[in-house]
Amino acid sequence: MRRYLLKKPFSEIEKVYYDTVIIGSGIAGVYTALCLNSEKETVIITKDTIDMSNSVLAQGGIAVSLDKGDSPALHFQDTLTAGAGLCNEESVWVLVNEAADRIERLLEFGVQFDRKSKDELAFGREAAHSKNRIIHAGDTTGKEVCDKLILAAKNRKNITIKEKVFAVDLITEGQEAKGVLAYDEKKKEFVIFVSDAIVCAAGGFGRLYKMTTNPDVATGDGVCMAYRAGAFLADMEFVQFHPTVLYHPENKHFLISEAVRGEGAVLRNQKKERFMHRYHKLEELAPRDVVARAIFTEMQKDQAENVFLDITFKDREYLMNRFPNIFKTCLGYGIDMSKNYIPVAPAEHYCMGGIKTDVWGRTNIKGFYACGEAACTGIHGANRLASNSLLEGLVFGGNIARILNRQGRKKEKITIRDACLPEYALSFEDKDLEIKEHIREIMTSYVGIVRNKEGLETALKMIRGYISLIEKKEPLIPEHFEIYNMLQLAEVITENALFREESRGAHFRSDFTSPDDKQKKSIIREIGKEVRYDTEPHVY
Ligand code: SIN
């Protein structure tokens, strides 16, 4: 695969200069921008509109140990237990200890969380949490938080927001970041955002799968751009499937929040029988990977495509107030959750892996930082604890801003040399766009909830076949770049999944069903190098 995707020399592309370039407009990107000093000229570039991100869709809430009887130590322990032995403890400590401060900041930005009383936040429960510690805004927490942060960003003079700008490649010289090569869809032109401080908060890669809760934009472009530039990726084989996503002919993406099970909802199979007691002592509130696999097994047994979620024992009024968005959406499909079971199935939800960073968001490339789902700080290990991801964006985005605020400004002094650019023999054809759907089918069939050697090898062969097909073709528009990125990441995920010959957290191998302590290490990927276990120090 090539270092850069575009074949046009950098000297022929317009350049714009900023102190900080942030890629992505979810909670991590926007919060980082808001924490930067007001003299830092900052641009947020986003592939779609500013309000289109995975964060906006987050329903459940944000984990914080503020309730009586709770503590950061308990939150730490729950995170580690869910992470199945692979969490980075230093990062998790930072996460749980900084949580209260970040919630305070959100309240200052005007975020309205649900309350028990005027002075007390309401705390919900989600799977694998030993305490009620999820603060929420109804069942649209992500939207409430993002709306308030985006409003604040729009009011800051030092922050420019550029929508419909697709980040294609990170420009580096040596091991240093110099800028971002991007495609401005409105102007139909390429542009280089020159900066020595580039933050990738571009989210994950859920759209590599057929069924996902992620929006269309989640094709892993930020992670793949970093990989091409030489950034280390970690934990890429760990892909989280949310157990309960609406399964309706017209909608197979809508999340039915874990908070519904937190309020007591139970799972039933096709015979309308409960089954979770056969899989885990915490039943419906077992860790997410356990619940997703249990549902998958029941669906296979019954040769069915879904199971059911039952919260019919709660009254209508209560459900309409606690879950207004879920209630309304289900009703739109003729499902009254106070009377009917909700058909659900697991779907891809979150990528634990990403660009390897330390607790300051630093990567192995100088001047290049990552936070949010695009990053791998090691807090999720092999399986993310529910409602830790919005928090992750706030904590590590805030940390990146702290580091950048200490740096001087030198943006106008940065020069960019032309690099060695690729040659292409062929052009993309319309039928090549179908490759995206094929990738999703391959990943869902062979690199999904249950994996094995034979399936992974089949997937790898098909993915590599597509890679050799498109390698000769010149990518010109975002859809072409996405295909490159999706194939490159699909290959990385599949190779990692083959390499890890054990079952741990979200990575389940039917041919190696137990964890193997000798493999209790992260897998690191570096372009052009063999798959390897992590031996690097966690600080850059
Ligand atoms: C949910 O509401 O179930 C999702 C929460 C999360 O993924 O953290």
Image (tube, rainbow, N blue to C red):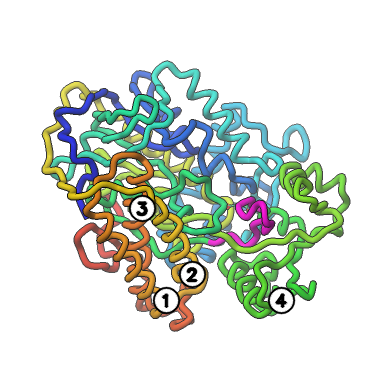
Q: Earlier in the sequence, mark 3 or mark 1?
A: 3
Which element carries disc 4, helix, strand or loop? helix
Looking at the image, is 115 positioned above or below residue 318? above
Label 4, label 3: how far apart the Cα atoms are: 46 Å
The numbered dot on residue 455 is: 1
Q: Which residue is mark 4?
A: 277
Disc 1 and disc 4 in contact, CB within 8 angstroms: no
Image quarter for residue 346?
Answer: bottom right
Residue type of the residue flagged with mark 2: Ser
Label 2, label 1: how far apart the Cα atoms are: 8 Å
Disc 2 and disc 1 in contact, CB within 8 angstroms: yes
Label 1, label 4: how far apart the Cα atoms are: 30 Å
Q: Earlier in the sequence, mark 1 or mark 4?
A: 4
Q: Which residue is mark 3?
A: 432
Boundaries of the magenta span: 241-255
User: Quick one: label 3, few (<14), some, or many (20+) residues within 10 Å?
Assistant: some
Q: Nearer the viewer, residue 436 or 344?
A: 436
The numbered dot on residue 52 is: none
Q: Which mark lies nearer to you, 4 or 3?
A: 3
User: Quick one: label 1, few (<14), some, or many (20+) residues within 10 Å?
Assistant: some
Label 3, label 1: how far apart the Cα atoms are: 24 Å
Image quarter for residue 185?
Answer: top left
**Does residue 4 appear anywhere in the picture?**
yes
- Residue at horizontal 52%, vertical 69%? 449
Residue 24 picture location, percent across and down: 42, 37
Q: Which residue is mark 2?
A: 445
Which element carries disc 2, helix, strand or loop? helix
Image quarter for residue 371?
Answer: top left
Residue 419 picture location, percent across and down: 12, 40
Q: Nearer the viewer, residue 379 or 71?
A: 379
